[in-house]
Structures are given as C-alpha cells and as structure tokens.
Amino acid sequence: MLKALIMGIVEGLTEFLPISSTGHLILAGSLLDFVGPAFPKAKADVFEIVIQAGAILAVCWEYRSRISTVLAGLFSDRKAQRLVINLIIAFLPAAILGFLFSAKIKALLFAPLPVAVAFIVGGLIILWVERRQQGRFSYTRIDTVDDMTPLDAFKVGCAQALALIPGTSRSGATIIGGMMFGLSRKAATEFSFFLAIPTLLAATVYSLFKERALLSAADVPLFTVGTLAAFVSAFLCVRWLLRYISSHDFSIFAWYRIVFGLVILGTAYSGVVAWID
C-alpha cells in the first residue's frame, strides 16, 4: 500500500510537467522493487496506466467550468465544436501508433537506461526551443486554444506520438511541440491538459479491458490508493504549473531532466544503483 501511495504521488506530480511521468514511474518502480511475486510486471504495467485516471480527474476538476461549457455547446457553439474536433485530430496519431507499436516499444525501451537517455535528449530539445523563443526566431501566432486550426492540432498530435518513447514526456512533447508550431506558452499548456483527457482515458480503458484477466477484487485497494494519490498530487501540480508559466519558461525542467538522466547513467555505470528493468 505504501509503494502504491508513492507511485500515485509520482504519477500525479510528473504527469503534466515536461519531465515524463512514465519515465519516473519506471525509475520509481525499479527503486521500490514494485514488481515482485505478489505483483507481477504485467499487473504493475496496468497499475501504472490506471492511476493516470487520477491525473485525468484532476484536470477535469480544474477545468470543470470550461468542460461544462464545451459539452453544453457541442451542438450549437462553433468554438466548442472546433475544440472537440481539434482534440480528436490530435488524439489520433498517438492512438494509432500506440496500438500498432506499443508492445515492441515496451519490450525494447521500458527500462531505466533508455529512459535516462530520453531524459537528456528531451532536456536538450527544451533548452533549444526556449532559446529559440527568446531570440529573433521567436514564433507565436496562436494566443488561445480557440484559435487553433485542425492542422495545428494534427502537428501537436504528431508531437504527442513521440511520447510513446518512455522518458520523452507526453506533456513535454505537446507543450514544447506546440510552442515550436506557433502556440503561445499558455495555449500550448492548456491544449496539452485538454488532450490528456481523451489520451489517458483511452489508455486506461484499453489497458483494463486488455488485461482484465490479471485483475481481481484483491487489487482494488492498491489501485484506489494509487489513483487517489495521483488525483491529489496532480491537482496541486496543475494549479502550480498554471501560475508558474505566467512568468517563467521551461528551462528549469530541461536542466532537471539532463541532471537526473546523467545521475541515472552515472549510478548505473559505477554500480552504485542496480537499476532493474
């Protein structure tokens, strides 16, 4: 139960920051020996996906007024219709590629050392984009999510597909990708939040259905603790991030990724930590 609580907190704190929740869950699970005889790897994989529901609920609660407005105007409001269509378009690339290649990606890349490399590469990309934003090549043409076109949504969706590689970060790919494609920092962040709802919900439902034979009533307490922990920590994190981006860039997260990735590689190479795949 304590390990489930810690994993839930890690999920909630990292899901919407550009530092990769999947990567952190892989590393936390390795350090905690989360996988064991009583909790095999297949079930642990389901747990890590299902607790994302807590993070989804946190975003839904934070944006409950906006979501209610969109749902109410789904058949009459052009802005609401445009947002829903854009979310569907942005959702499809990762959904299709994930369905086709997720098993191979998990087999090859779901391990601490590939995650560390992805941390470092992702951090360098964030630093490059932030420097580009502050220089003469700064490019912002979309101030709010309501101004996005279907093509903009498709580009962000393609960026999100890169997050199938663990350690890349779904939120990082969509936010930084959105900024590269002309979205303002706020618009990219909010669209990333909205896009998380269908993306993570679909992953949760699909994983539960696919692995339903692995689960039993005895697993409910662990899954509940992890999901609730993810909800509370994600809610706090989302509110903090919205305040943070009003006056800061994402460079601090880039340096965190780079340093953390180097620490993982260094401890693995020196034998200080026996990172378990």
Image (cartoon, grey):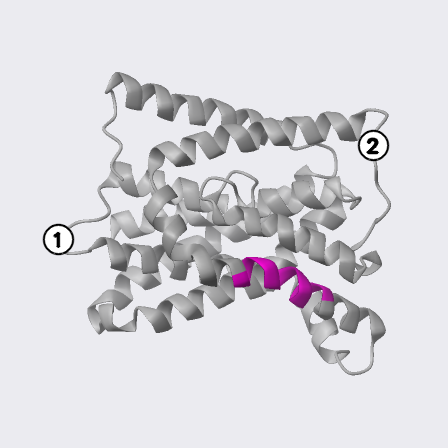
How far across and down, in percent of the image, does residue 49 sit? 40, 58
Image quarter of the C terminus? top left
User: Where is residue 68, by image quadrant?
Assistant: bottom right
Of residue 220 and residue 159, the one placed in the foreground of this image is 159
Asked if residue 227 lies left or right of residue 187, the reply is left
Q: Residues within 10 Å of mark 2 (few under 14, many from 20)?
A: some
Name the element at disc 2.
loop
* Magenta range: 86-96
Please name the amino acid that badge 2 sits on. Ser
How far across and down, in percent of the image, does residue 213 sit? 24, 73
Was residue 17 drawn as part of the magenta stretch in this picture? no
For the residues marked 1 and 2, what is the alpha-carbon distance in whole angstroms? 53 Å
Residue 131 numbered mark, or none: none
In the picture as drawn, the residue positioned furthest to the left comes out as 37
Asked if residue 94 lies left or right of residue 205, the reply is right
Q: Which residue is mark 2?
A: 138
How far across and down, in percent of the image, does residue 237 sit? 55, 46
User: Where is residue 195, by image quadrant?
Assistant: bottom right
How far across and down, in percent of the image, does residue 157 sit? 64, 55
**How many discs appear?**
2
Residue drawn at x 39%, y 22% as measured from the top left: 263
**Sooner in the amino-acid sequence: mark 1 or mark 2:** 1
Q: Which residue is mark 1?
A: 37
Residue drawn at x 52%, y 38% as measured from the top left: 19
Q: State whether residue 59 is above or below residue 245.
A: below
Please name the amino acid that badge 1 sits on. Pro
